[in-house]
Each structure stands twice: as structure tokens, then as C-alpha cells.
Image (cartoon, rainbow, N blue to C red):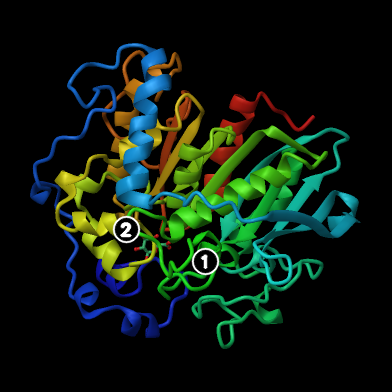
Amino acid sequence: MLPVLRVLLPGVVGACCLVATFLPASAQEFTPNYDEALIPKYTLPDPLVFPDGSPVSTAEQWKTKRRAQILEQFAESVYGHVPPAQPDVRFAVTKQIDNFRNGRATLKEIEIRVGAADQPTVLTLLLITPHLNRPVPVFLGLNFAGNHAIAADPEITLNPNWIRPNYAGVVNNHATEASRGISASRWPIDLLLERGYGLATMYYGDIDPDFDDGFKNGIHPWFYKEGQTQPAPDEWGSIAAWAWGLSRALDYLGQDAQVDAQRVAVLGHSRLGKTSLWAGAQDERFALVISNDSGCGGAALSRRAIGETVQRINTSFPHWFCKRFHEYNRKESELPVDQHELIALIAPRPVYVASAEDDRWADPKGEFLSAFHADPVYRLLGTAGLGGQQPDPEMPAVDHPRNGGTIGYHIRTGKHDLTEYDWQQYLNFADRHFQHSAK
Ligand code: GTR
């Protein structure tokens, strides 16, 4: 997609022109920079230096002190803290079909009911597991348009909640039968089953609908203190809420006998890639973390300000990050962290960052550089990092994945999307790190 069009129709598959009219004037006037020569001079914060200037020189120092400091900085200044309240969370398996896809798999729908028993917020997790007579590793990822959109199979319940209008079959912000399977190309279920993996997915809008309503809907209100009507400036926006939902899904997966909960990979595309990174950074039970084209506020370095910038994202999507993050609009260099440190928080667990050649809005080079600058933390923790004796600072060529280490990276031909090519790389990477094979 042409960059200029991307500005008006940001990242939306099959969007209609109406989207542009929803953007505030300041967002529409934004002209992205794509010239490397115009990147502001910047110095990245060093994850391996303590605030007092002393070096982090042992794995122990990282694990016991430094990691927590950086995690706190991200919560405080970027994604927001999850408030301390603990609303009730209950699981109910509401559907089970053991002969899904001609008897190859079991399909389950699990309601994750958050808050008061009489009127909970309901998140519906879809779980599809191959019949292998043993617990299977699972890829868990949020979806954009409802569980029914990932496959045309009529067994999947049509989502009843608010859905963005730009998806096929959505009428008055609600799914219809015509919405079934519209995102199937992003979710190659048969391939996963063949490779011996389960798939778990949930609609992100179940957790918090993706529009700026001052946090009246979704799960945020369950966490308000008496009299509170919206999150405090250092409390969570939507991305952190979506990440919270992923952790609750993982809680359920830990109870399901068909799932090997020690081997759950969390994956997300675009805004949901930002989410999978934040979920994986906070919740160390995720054994592998995948960012597909996550861009600004995800894998891309904020300080490069190429394509989408902090100001632009906070203007177009004021509800995604915490309000404190807005203080860094056009002041990226004042951020206490940058996104390579988000990748570093996942160490020593395997992480995969992927870009697409035509996805300049998400700054592929900035996504690679985050992986590159996270490498020293991975090596301090005794892993192979990006692989090689020294990490190679050159970006891999298009369609030549660099995934022999603990940090995987590829840039593929094509546009902003989650494709079968991407999945093939993730499956190979997971096979190696999970020591898994379909047999
Ligand atoms: C865009 C946004 C990106 C990315 C994308 C998506 O509009 O600017 O940061 O998240 O949406 O989620 O598809």
C-alpha cells in the first residue's frame, strides 16, 4: 500500500474511506518520514546499565534487579499498570466438539467470565487441538474480527459484540453469517494440526472494544476504585488490557488436559503484535513470543521515528497506551526505555520478530534493530541471541530468515499481513525450541 494511503487508512485490511473521517485533524495532517538521513540523532538506553551508571554484569543481576526496573518503566510510561483490584475470573467450557474437521481435532469454546456473576464481561476462547493422545503445544493469539472470522466452520459461535466496521460481513458493527472465515488466510488451522500444534484464539474486542470511549466498556471498569471513572495516567490502556486477557487465556490452558501449558507460544499481528510482546514480557509463563509486523509501540524502536511515530499513534489511537505515554509525543528521546528493552524482557525465552518489506509504516529496520539491541541481554543469560559469534548488525535479506538463535527475525516480501510464510517460520522456530515434532 502507498505510504500516503497508509496514513489515511492505517493498517486496515479492506478498509473503506470512512475510516479517515474518524481520525482527528492532527492525525490526518501527519506526514511520515521514510528517509533514514532525517532520523533524529539518538542514543538508546542500555538495558545492561543500572540507573546509577553501574554495569549489569551477571545474569543474576539481570534476573533479580535490572529486569524488574525496566518492566516497571514500561508499565509506568508506555502501556500502563494493571490496577491491583482482582475481579472474579471464572472459566466455563460452553462447547466441545470432538470430531472437528473430520475427526482430526477437538474444538472447544471456553467462556472466561470477568467480574460480577450476574453481568460479567465474557471473553470467549476458541481452542482447537489435534488428536494426538498427549498434551500438545499451542499457539495463542488474539484475533481482530471474532473467532468466527478465523475459519468458515459453522461450529464456531458468531461473536455477538461490537466489531470494527471495516471487515466483510459486519453490519452495524456486528458480525453476520457473511463474516465467517474472512480472516482464514491468517490462521492456517490445518497446517497447525498437521504439525502437531493446537491453536487458541480470542477476539480482542471481547476484552476491550477498540475505540476510544473513555474506558467505559470492556474489562477496565472491573478494576476501578470506588468513584473512579477512567484509568489514572499511569494505568493501563487497551493494549495492556488485551495482554491481561492473554494471560487469563493462559490460566485456562494450564487447566486443559489436552494442552501442554509449558509450551504455549503467544503470537500477534500489528496492534496485537504490540500486545503479544507486552504479554510475553510480563508473563514469564509464555514459553515463546512472536511479534508479526508490530511496528510503533511494538518491536520498532521509537527513537527512529520512521513511519508511524509516538505522536501519531497516540493521536490516532488515544486509548492504546497509558496517558503518560502521550507526554513523549515528539519527544521520543526522553522516553526512559526503547522497544529493544521490551524484547530483552522476554529473555532468555525465545522470541521472534517479523517484518514485511512493504510495511514501511511499521519500520522494518527499526523492528530488526530492536532484536539486534536485545541480543546482549540474551547472551548475558547464556543463550545464542540472534545467533553467530557476534550478532550481525546487517539486516537479513528479504525472505532469508535469521532464525538459528534464540531471537528469530525475518523480513518477507509483501505487505502488512500475517501469512502462511510467516507461520512456516514460526512453526520451524517453535519445533526447534520446544523440541517438538508432529510424530
Ligand atoms: C495501524 C496502526 C499500527 C498498527 C495497525 C494494525 O493503524 O497505525 O500501529 O497497529 O494499525 O493494528 O493493523
Task: Report the quarter where the N terminus lies.
Answer: bottom left
Which residue corresponds to mark 2? 233
In which quadrant will I find the C terminus?
top right
Q: Which residue is mark 1?
A: 221
Furthest-bottom residue in this view = 172
Q: Position of residue 51 (x, y in %)?
A: 22, 27
> Vertical placement of 439 versus 154: above or below?
above
Q: Residue at x 54, y 68 (%)?
A: 218
Q: Quadrant of residue 430?
A: top right
Q: Amino acid at mark 2?
A: Pro
Label 2: which secondary element: loop
- Per the rendering, the mark at residue 347 is none
Regarding residue 283, the answer to whether it shows in the image is yes
Contact? badges 2 and 1 (CB < 8 Å): no
Residue that appears at 42% across and 56% down:
236
Spatial distance from mark 2 to mark 1, Cα to Cα?
Answer: 15 Å
Q: Say which label, 2 or 1, has the lower sequence index.
A: 1
Q: Secondary structure at mark 1?
A: helix
Q: Residue at x 72, y 43 (%)?
A: 253
Amino acid bearing label 1: Pro
